[in-house]
Amino acid sequence: MIGLRVSVVLGLAITSLSLAGCATPARTEAMVASSVVAPIAANASKKLRGNIAIGEVTGGSATNPMWVSKVGGAEFERALETSLRNFGFLSENRQAGGYRLIADLREVNQPIGGFDLTVTSTVEYQLIDRTSNASIYRETITAPHTAKMADAWDANERLRLGNEGSIRANIERLIQRLSSLNP
């Protein structure tokens, strides 16, 4: 009788885990800076418009479907590139830009659990003038985003939404900073 109860409980636990879903990685398109920063980006220096090439992008982690959602390095790089392109900063190719942007995704701080999940990303950015090889901008940007229970019932989904929102907010802050530079 005890063995039957253990089997039933174990079976229910396995079924619950399989229904809970697998962790999915942060999606590139959901991490791209939104049009909220468009009015700010419109005032950017003409020297930076179409003149920034993506340099080295480091950091990020692959998502293990059996664990929790993560932000992959390649997805982060594509979101950064798309954001710079959308707001008119990206040069046509990586060798043509007068400025090189280096990004290091240092940390994506995720909660262990909860109803509302706040994820905080920390990225160090550096903008280098290719002519002088001088750094004209260097900053570590930290940006939180909270995915609420109303956004997604599943905790894995909420965590993914938190990751995406945090990276999006981080890139938006970068766009704001670039828009105010006058090299």
Image (cartoon, helix red, strand yellow):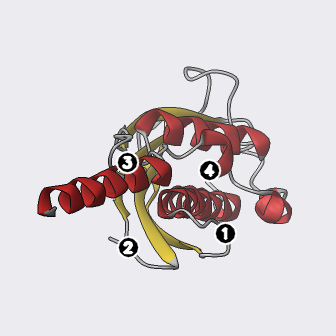
Callout 2–callout 3 Cβ contact below 8 Å: no
Vertical side of 62 occupied by 21: above or below: below
Give, as a three-letter code, the residue at label 2.
Gly
Percent across and percent down for residue 175 are 66, 57
Residue for badge 4: 31
Q: CA distance from mark 1 to mark 4?
A: 16 Å
Residue for badge 3: 104
Of badges 1 and 4, nearer the viewer stands: 1
At x 49% / y 61%, what residue is drawn?
Answer: 159
> Which of the two discs, 1 and 2, labels the residue nearer the N terminus?
2
Q: CA distance from mark 1 to mark 3?
A: 29 Å
Residue 100 visible within the image: no
Farthest residue toward the bottom?
115
**How many residues crowd mark 2 within 10 Å: few (<14), some (14–19), many (20+)?**
few
Give, as a three-letter code, the residue at label 1.
Asp
Horizontal side of 31 relative to 49 (left or right) equals left
At x 59% / y 67%, what residue is drawn?
Answer: 153
Q: CA distance from mark 1 to mark 2?
A: 15 Å
Of badges 1 and 3, nearer the viewer stands: 1
Residue for badge 1: 151
Of badges 4 and 2, nearer the viewer stands: 2
> Which of the two discs, 2 and 3, labels the residue nearer the N terminus?
3
**How many residues crowd mark 4 within 10 Å: few (<14), some (14–19), many (20+)?**
many
Residue for badge 2: 113
